Amino acid sequence: MPTKKAQYNISEADLFMNEVEQRSGQNLSACYQCRRCAAGCPVGMQTRVTPDRLVRMIMLGSRDEALNNLLVWKCVACYTCGTRCPNNIQTARITETLKQMAKEAGIDPLIHRTADFNSAFMQAAGHLGRFNELEGMAIYETKSMLKDIKKGDLKSIITEIKDQAQLGLVMAEKKRLHLKFDRVKNLSEIKTMYKKAKSSKKEDMQ
């Protein structure tokens, strides 16, 4: 008698973890919760979610919890976690992936200034091939202030202007504020990379 083929049902948890692994290039299955990453995370105390906890959320299929936590938006990409991890799992690449997935899902960022800065950085870098402080910060501040205006939060706008003005003066004194708009030599290569990234992103979403 012919034998029936075994049927394997992939759970939503597995699908979520597989998607994060594929998009981030990280082998989450290799995490055995040694928590070395947690001991070195500079924002773990603020976010109350350390890299090991985030990986665990993903492995358990807690999609909403993984896409809506402060570590995703406060991760400074210092790569301390990956340096300490015995299996070289880079949480910064995972948080960046989760940012993209949250945006695609229409989820509002917990810290809109982080999302605005990411967007401004990519836009400015795509224009000149490198990030220019004046252009990048102008885009960033415009995006952020428009949202604060809609909220009627004038106090945040005034505070931000004061903080950025003070930072600009310090950078100018230390000769770290570059006013020149420099382009990379092969800007067409950068633009081609951007086009490929956008097309591959559309294919992944279809």
Image (cartoon, helix red, strand yellow):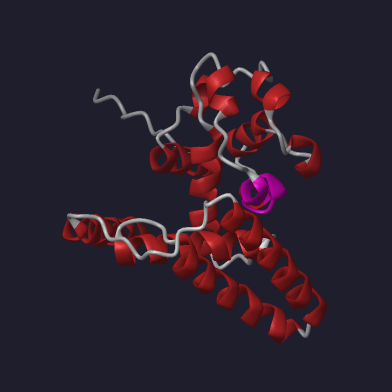
Residue 66 visible here? no
Residue interval drawn in magenta: 65-74
Which image quarter: residue 24? top left
Instruction: Identify the residue shown where x is 55% and y is 69%.
Output: 140
x, y percentage for residue 174?
A: 58, 49
Can you say whether 107 is above or below 149 in the image?
above
Give whichever of 164, 13 is nearer the camera: 164
Q: Where residue 25 appears, x then y in whole percent?
A: 40, 35
Residue at left 67%, top 44%? 71
Point 48% across, 68% down: residue:
134
| Residue 146 appears in the rendering | yes
Rendered location of residue 43, percent (x, y): 72, 39
Q: Nearer the viewer, residue 36 or 64?
A: 36
Q: Is residue 116 magenta?
A: no
Quarter containing the C terminus: bottom left
Q: Main secondary structure of the magenta part?
A: helix
* Residue nearest the observer in this picture, 177 or 88: 177
Quarter occupied by residue 196: bottom left
Count the labels in the image.
Answer: 0
Residue at point 52%, 73% (across, down):
138
Q: Considering only vertical position in the picture, is 120 above or below 48? A: below
70 in magenta = yes
Q: Quadrant of the N terminus?
A: top left
